[in-house]
Amino acid sequence: MTQDPDTLRAYVDGELDEVTASRLAKAAEVDPELAARIAAETRLRDILSAHFDPVLAEQVPQRLVLPIETSRKVVSLQDRRPLRSIVPTRMVRWAVPAMAAALALTVFLPGSGGPTETRDGLIFAANDLAEALDTQLVADRVAGNDTRILLSFADKEGTLCRAFARTDLSGIACMDDTGWHLRIQQGGVDIRPGDYRQASSVDNAIMASAQEMAVGPAFDAEQERLARAQSWRPR
């Protein structure tokens, strides 16, 4: 039984109607491939929930709430409607992908103090990103830190890897003989304390890539501390 990914995600999240969900569950009982896809979506949901639910529970910072509260006022929709016609809908549809592309194409040159450098045609973490990957744990929430570690895991070859998010770059880096090799690169996200929230396409893409690369579940806090003590080299 062929099912599109959106339907499978809706099933795992409990968003399908009872009839459709029941039909899909029965189909999975006799279709091993469908059952495996549902299991994979369930694992991905569990990984996302484990790492982002605590962030979602954080209280919105007062510095963000106060400007909204102080500027709240009643506005006539009739008065505001003419302003909407100033920017055509077609222009908005083009502008959003263009801005996203511009962010994705940000380049950090070697020696520029950026988070990456190129060696032998491969991209490696550098400067503060390399330091964060070396020392920072998932549970760490360091004020002013430009990097947030999302999870740590071992890939199919036993190499230790870490998923991370920054305002300028996000991705997955794996430790090799010369440093943190960036295997996956995505655009940046807002990781300021209290502002980071789940459900961006960047987050989902990184977590999906980690799931495909990993053998077994993400490291727990004790496994991370042990890996850090061993300089992220497999035992």
Image (tube, rainbow, N blue to C red):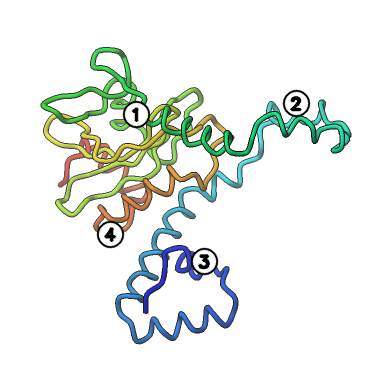
Give the Cα separation between the discs numbered 4 and 2. Answer: 45 Å
Q: Position of residue 57 (x, y in %)?
A: 61, 47
Q: As displayed, is residue 102 above or below residue 3?
A: above
Give the Cα separation between the discs numbered 3 and 4. Answer: 24 Å
Q: Mark 3 sits on what residue?
A: 10
Q: Mark 4 sits on what residue?
A: 216
- The image quadrant of residue 17 is bottom right
Q: Mark 2 sits on what residue?
A: 67
The nearer-to-camera label among 3 and 1 is 3
Q: Mark 1 sits on what residue?
A: 132
Q: Position of residue 157 (x, y in %)?
A: 14, 51
Q: Earlier in the sequence, mark 4 or mark 2?
A: 2
The residue most toward the top is: 112
Q: Are marks 4 and 2 in contact (CB under 8 Å)?
A: no
Q: Position of residue 211 (x, y in %)?
A: 32, 55
Q: Position of residue 179 (x, y in %)?
A: 18, 30
Give the Cα separation between the discs numbered 1 and 2. Answer: 33 Å
Quadrant (top left, top right, bottom left, bottom right) of the N terminus: bottom left
Q: Earlier in the sequence, mark 4 or mark 1?
A: 1
The nearer-to-camera label among 1 and 2 is 2
> What residue do we see at 32% from left, 45% from top?
152
Give the Cα separation between the discs numbered 3 and 1. Answer: 35 Å
Q: Earlier in the sequence, mark 3 or mark 1?
A: 3
Q: Earlier in the sequence, mark 2 or mark 3?
A: 3
Disc 2 marks a residue whose amino acid type is Pro
Q: Secondary structure at mark 2?
A: helix
Q: Secondary structure at mark 1?
A: helix
Disc 1 marks a residue whose amino acid type is Ala
The nearer-to-camera label among 4 and 2 is 2
Q: Residues within 10 Å of mark 4 (few under 14, many from 20)?
A: few
Left or right of 71 in this view: 205: left
